[in-house]
Image (tube, helix red, strand yellow):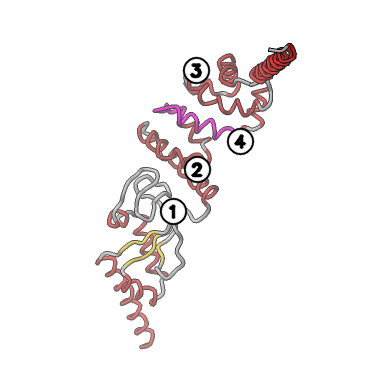
């Protein structure tokens, strides 16, 4: 091999080694500059939890880390180092947005919750209740919670539905009380699958049906007798002729319910005849 070729090869080898060293230095710098949220939490979780009031919830160290790691990673941003006080300030500054994430993460990491944990989650879950409502309802039943907590969860559900899916909201489930009943009579929260008969046995439906018969026109009542069904929304029973939404439910009428309508029509005719006679 000529001297010129050997010199050229050595030069190429030297350049390649130098390029490799530079790549290693850049890779090391990138690794060194990455913020490791999990490692940071392992060092600081007790102090952070105490400052945020999460130390009273009875979560294990591992559960706290799992619940907070993604949030800490986001809050750290481009920082390569951050102290606990700065992290606490960032948590507090964005707490309205962070609290639902914490609540959702707690609901996810805990197979079963204590009363304190459930109360915290119920108060802070926000729009994530659309995901966790079945679990929260089940836990509330298991722990024997009062109607007060159920009402908090039900109101959270309604707000979240409107925020994420708009109006109208679905009809109310007679079993769990959530406005979560689908057109096929299955509840999105408690999972019950109702028959028409079971739904119509609820005091709420009976009341709305009677109110509808009172306010409906004679023409509407006659139409419903022929159609054999009414429409149920979250707030009322209405005629099939009225505008319908995707969450409305068709309810077929029994012989007794049709008889109620006939009685109303008969009473109206008698009243009209009496007025004419006078």
Mark nearer the viewer, 4 or 3: 3
Is 108 within the magenta? Answer: yes
Q: Which residue is tagged 2?
A: 156
Query: Which residue is drawn at the image coordinates 64% and 23% (left, top)?
Result: 88
- For the record, the magenta segment spans 96-118
Q: Are marks 4 and 3 in contact (CB under 8 Å)?
A: no
Q: Are marks 4 and 2 in contact (CB under 8 Å)?
A: no
Q: Which residue is tagged 4?
A: 96
Farthest front residue?
2
For label 3, count other residues whose C-alpha is less than 10 Å away and answer few (under 14), some (14-19) or many (20+). some
Mark nearer the viewer, 3 or 2: 3
Which quarter of the picture shows residue 25?
top right
Q: Which residue is tagged 1?
A: 170
Mark 1 and mark 2: Cα distance apart in space = 14 Å
Indicate which disc, 1 or 4, sits on the residue closer to the N terminus.
Answer: 4
Q: Which residue is tagged 3?
A: 61
Image coordinates of residue 247 in percent, x first then y, are 43, 56
Indicate which disc, 4 or 3, sits on the residue closer to the N terminus.
Answer: 3
Indicate which disc, 4 or 2, sits on the residue closer to the N terminus.
Answer: 4
């Amino acid at each position: 091999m000529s001297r010129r070729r050997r010199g050229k090869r050595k030069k190429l080898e030297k350049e390649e080694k130098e390029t490799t060293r530079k790549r290693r230095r850049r890779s090391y710098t990138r690794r060194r500059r990455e913020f490791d949220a999990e490692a940071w939490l392992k060092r600081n979780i007790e102090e952070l939890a105490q400052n945020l009031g999460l130390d009273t919830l009875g979560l294990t160290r591992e559960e706290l880390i799992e619940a907070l790691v993604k949030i800490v990673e986001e809050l750290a941003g481009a920082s390569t180092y951050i102290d606990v006080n700065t992290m606490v300030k960032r948590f507090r500054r964005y707490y309205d947005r962070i609290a639902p994430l914490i609540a959702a993460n707690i609901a996810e990491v805990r197979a079963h919750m204590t009363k304190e944990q459930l109360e915290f989650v119920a108060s802070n879950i926000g729009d994530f209740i659309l995901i966790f409502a079945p679990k929260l309802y089940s836990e509330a039943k298991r722990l024997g919670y009062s109607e007060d907590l159920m009402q908090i969860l039900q109101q959270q559900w309604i707000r979240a539905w409107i925020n994420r899916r708009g109006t109208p909201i679905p009809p109310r489930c007679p079993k769990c009380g959530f406005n979560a009943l689908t057109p096929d009579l299955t509840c999105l929260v408690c999972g019950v699958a109702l028959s028409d008969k079971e739904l119509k046995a609820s005091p709420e439906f009976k009341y709305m049906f009677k109110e509808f018969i009172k306010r409906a026109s004679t023409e509407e009542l006659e139409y419903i007798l022929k159609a054999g069904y009414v429409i149920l929304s979250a707030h009322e029973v209405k005629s099939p002729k009225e505008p319908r939404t995707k969450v409305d439910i068709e309810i077929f009428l029994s012989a007794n319910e049709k008889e109620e309508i006939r009685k109303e029509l008969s009473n109206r005719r008698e009243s009209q005849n009496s007025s004419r006679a006078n």
